[in-house]
Image: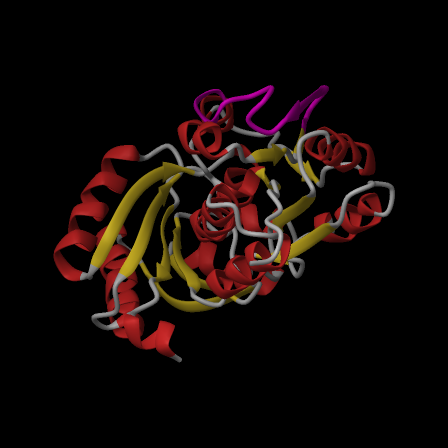
Amino acid sequence: MGEQHSRRIAVLSDSASCLSEEVRQRLGIRVVPFWLAWGQDVYRDLLDISPAAFYRRFLAGPPYPTTSTPTLGDFLAAYQDAAREADGIVYVHVPARLTSAASVARLASRDVDVPVRLVDAHVPGTPEGFVVLAAAELAAQGADLQAVVAGARAAARRVGMYVCLETLEHLRRGGRVGEIAFRAGTRMGIRALLRLVDGRVRPVTARRSRGAITEAMLEALCDEVGDAPLRVGVLHAACEDDARDLAELVRQRCCARELHVAELTPVMGAHSGPGTLGIGYERLPTDLDRAA
């Protein structure tokens, strides 16, 4: 039998992953926060401002916050801290199509003494969190760097999300929806249903009432996943009661092996706005998938 080597792989994520503090602590997941600028104030997402404080201020009206990626120094500090305990680092990041965070993280990795591998989660929010969990659970089992990366990338191919927005205003401010679409939506008083997959935001449909757009989201999810076993995260922005009602409907209509309710972190809420509801999911691998 060959010589056995004990390895420790550190798993990092960013604050768009919407992981609970309990999960982060239990699995030793380090989080590199995004930044928010709000008038004269500057915050590190989750560290300097909580979701509750963020939404209270947001609901008071404009001016609204802007967001920016972690800095080169932020990533370097996180890597160096992780490298004190680890033989390798895996950073699961928000989709590269949506932000430059991955480019900054890659630059910082050149100045670290242990190997750093980046994995694109393809979808922010709880789907990103599910990819992080896949990596962290493998690392906790003693998997090596290559196996942790492979497991995380496999999970990233199984995730997606649907999001209902009360308004397109905040996406417009971030440059993620055109002015013509914004004006048309505002004039008609519509709520938009979007699908996030592979780093892209795609419109699905629009409805005037909250109940109708929520039902459209459930129908779209059920049509897509069928009876596949799922890990599901229901996301909300300052509307927890609605999220818990939606979670119960998901439980009744989908094969949800795991079901979580989470609040959108401030960096996510800055782009979606209060009242947002979403369903993030991961198709869980079946015995057939494992055999393949």
Query: What residue lies at 65% left-to-right and 26% top-to-bottom?
Result: 44
Is 140 rendered above or below residue 191? above
Query: What residue lies at 56% left-to-right and 51% top-to-bottom?
Result: 171
List the single residue furthest toward the front: 1
Residue 146 relative to residue 112: left or right: left
For the record, the magenta segment spans 37-53
Percent of width and height locating residue 227: 20, 70
Is 59 rendered above or below residue 169? above
**Dividing the picture into quarters, in which one does residue 285 lie?**
bottom left
Is 291 rendered above or below residue 241? below
Percent of width and height locating residue 194: 43, 62
Quick one: 2 or 157, which is closer to the camera?
2
Query: What residue lies at 55% left-to-right and 42% top-to-bottom?
Result: 16
Percent of width and height locating residue 245: 19, 43
Quick one: 46 or 8, which is closer to the camera?
8
Q: Quadrant of the N terminus?
A: bottom right
**Dividing the picture into quarters, in which one does residue 218 lie?**
bottom left
